[in-house]
Image: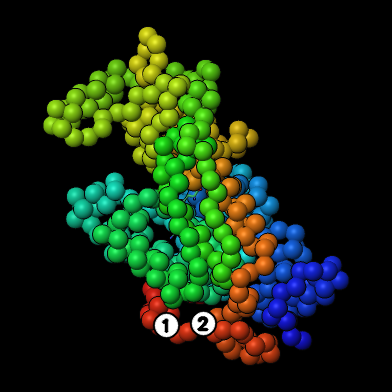
Amino acid sequence: MTVKKKANRATPKRATKIATQVKTKQDALSVREDVTPYIAGAYRFIDLFCGIGGFRIAFEKAGGKCVFSSDYDKFSQQTYEANFGERPHGDINEVDVTAIPFHDILCAGFPCQPFSIAGVSKKNSLGRLHGFDDVKQGNLFFSIADILDHHRPAAFVLENVKNLKGHDKGKTFRVIKDTLETILGYTIYTKIIDAKAVVPQHRERIFIVGFREKRDFEFPVFPEQGPLLGTILESRPHAKYTLTDHLWNYLQNYAAKHKAAGNGFGFGLVNKHDTTRTLSARYHKDGSEILIAQTGENPRRLTPRECARLMGYPDNYKLVVSDTQAYRQFGNSVVVPIVERIAETVMAALKKPAKQKLDLVLRDKKKVEDAGQIPTRIYPNTKYSAKKRTRKVK
Ligand SMILES: C[S@@+](CC[C@H](N)C(=O)[O-])C[C@H]1O[C@@H](n2cnc3c(N)ncnc32)[C@H](O)[C@@H]1O
């Protein structure tokens, strides 16, 4: 039985017919049919480098269904499991690409330390490699490329630090762009978005959205300024969040020293009428980037719940790890309402007919032939796919 390559979502009868075809074939091969999400009623997405599921909340709110998640950090896995009822798969390098289920959208906020300004200067000072040369973390982009290459989802959404664009004089971003566009054949859109439009935090992140077929897509438009800090503060935070005299003195002296030397920002003292600096994964160390002014007392740090709100997480989100881990997890996360708006626009773009013939590429030519299906285009054997990758495929 041949699954027709032309998607036709016009009638329920046609949809049922395709559903039957897809069902009978789905064990034999991965059928790339844009019509299937309408039958299932939701776009299926995978949540790579899922952390604590910021992408997942956003894509589920926009109507998506998560079919796979992966993160190797055991504390993030704990938080994810407590909130979504499933433990993410571990190290992506250990996951068999073919075992990842069929999906329409790939989501990934891939590790940013190899590209972030702070991460790069730390690695430089320790004499370590950064960017793609950081073998452990920099190469993870290519894990994403491998999955795109094999599964050919209709769309993807990637997130990273703003500095990704400028890292290594733009070379890193050029490799990413070339891999996604020239080698993998996706049409991509990129935008740096500041989360202060939706939460009281200045947090600029780059989003890369890609479509397998050409489609009408525009990033959502956000307001210049969103809510202020007062909207997310707890009324009676525990006294343990107030800085000790020792730490507060240290931070003030440190800031004064750096100010005198003409560099550094020191600490970021804010009140309820402000927008904070970017919450970092190192917030647990001294909390210096965001300190809340208090009358008659030393400033305090944000509580983990306030951090959750600062990242746009709902109040029913369960916090099940230590404060240290929670700060690290929120500092690494995405701002949920930003991703939610992007998810909505991506799904809206997928619902409209593609501007070119649907690309029912199956990576494995033999599998295609065995199944008697003629692909519209076989992904060419490029320098990327020819290159030996170090990842293990079980
Ligand atoms: C920037 S964070 C992404 C956070 C996520 N977007 C969220 O909303 O919470 C990157 C994540 O990648 C995970 N990670 C790093 N290397 C990994 C690997 N080899 N396999 C799986 N996960 C990995 C880290 O544990 C971290 O949680």
Query: For mark 1, does the 10 Å Cα neighbourhood hold few (<14), some (14 to 19), or many (20 or more) residues?
Result: few
Task: Inspect the image, locate mark 2, and give the three-letter code of the amino acid beneath it.
Answer: Tyr
Residue under pointer 1: 382
Residue bearing the label numbered 2: 379
Q: Quadrant of the N terminus?
A: bottom right
| Residue sitting at x 49%, y 74% | 185
CB under 8 Å between discs 2 and 1? yes
**Res. 53 visible in picture:** no
* Residue occupying image coordinates x 52% and y 42%: 222
Q: Quadrant of residue 254?
A: top left
Q: Position of residue 363 (x, y in %)?
A: 55, 80
Residue at screen point 68% across, 73% down: 33
Front residue of this view, candidates 312 and 301: 312
Query: Which of the numbered marks, if any, corresponds to residue 256?
Result: none
Identify the element where label 2 is drawn. Answer: loop
The CA distance from mark 2 to mark 1 is: 8 Å
Answer with the quarter of the image where residue 375 lies: bottom right
- Amino acid type shown at disc 1: Thr
Image coordinates of residue 240 in percent, x first then y, are: 43, 21
Q: Residues within 10 Å of mark 2 (few under 14, many from 20)?
A: some
Specify the farthest residue to the top: 296
Q: Residue 84: where, in percent of width, then height? A: 63, 48
| Colour basis | rainbow
Query: In which quadrant of the rendered view does residue 314 lie?
Result: top right
Label 1, secondary structure: give it: loop
- Depicted 294 relative to depicted 26: above or below: above
Q: Give the vertical position of 131 relative to 33 (above or below).
A: above
